[in-house]
Amino acid sequence: MNPEMLLVVLTFFVAISGLALLIQAYLLYGIYRTTKAIQTEALSILPQAKSILAKAETTLEESRKHIVEITAKANSMMDIGKAQLVKLDEVITDASSRAKVQLERAELIVDDTMSRVHHSVTSVHNGIIRPIREIQGLTSGVRTAVQHFLRGQRPSVAQVTQDDEMFI
């Protein structure tokens, strides 16, 4: 390439670079103006934000005091609850041990009563019912013997044969 053409190409590119620098400077000036506008708005909002933060800090301090009181009361209530649970556990343990002892006593009483009832039934059976049955058996035998002697007749041959056939 000839030197004149090279000079034209370089001049063209230098002009484009200069134009790009001007555009960048303009954009940088726009950013500066926008930043200044935002800064002025932020400075106008800053006193309000400071007052809100101050109110939030006082509210937070008051809340901390209340939270400390509430925490202390909750801890004392939990301590009372634990003490009551310990007492309740002792009462339940005592009641269950007493109930166990009473159940064992009741079982012994029931067993003793059952053995006495069994002994009484055995005594009644041996002392009253057995002699009554023996007397009843004797009276039946005597009655049958008396009936047999009072009948006085001999059994017929048909009746005797029938009685013998029953035993065969």
Image (cartoon, rainbow, N blue to C red):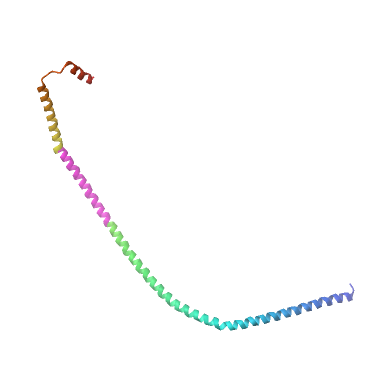
Give the main secondary structure, helix, strand or loop, of the magenta stretch: helix
User: Residue shown at 26%/52% (left/top)?
Assistant: 103
Q: Quadrant of the C terminus?
A: top left
User: Residue shown at 14%/38% (left/top)?
Assistant: 128
Please provide the residue range marked out in magenta.
98-126
User: Residue 145, relative to residue 72: is it above or below?
Assistant: above
- Name the residue nearer the viewer: 124 or 103: 124
User: Residue 31, relative to residue 137: is it above or below?
Assistant: below
Q: Find residue 95 and report its horizontal and vertical position in percent.
A: 28, 59
Q: Find residue 138 and report its horizontal and vertical position in percent.
A: 12, 30
Instruction: Kindly indicate the quadrant of the structure image that contains residue 136.
Output: top left
Q: Can residue 130 be found in the magenta stretch?
A: no
Q: Find residue 96 and report its horizontal and vertical position in percent.
A: 29, 57
User: Residue 154, relative to residue 61: is it above or below?
Assistant: above
Taking the image as shown, residue 45 lies to the left or right of residue 91, namely: right
Image label count: 0
Instruction: Kindly indicate the quadrant of the structure image that contains residue 121.
Output: top left
Q: Quadrant of the N terminus?
A: bottom right
Instruction: Kindly indicate the quadrant of the structure image that contains residue 134.
Output: top left
Q: Can residue 117 be found in the magenta stretch?
A: yes
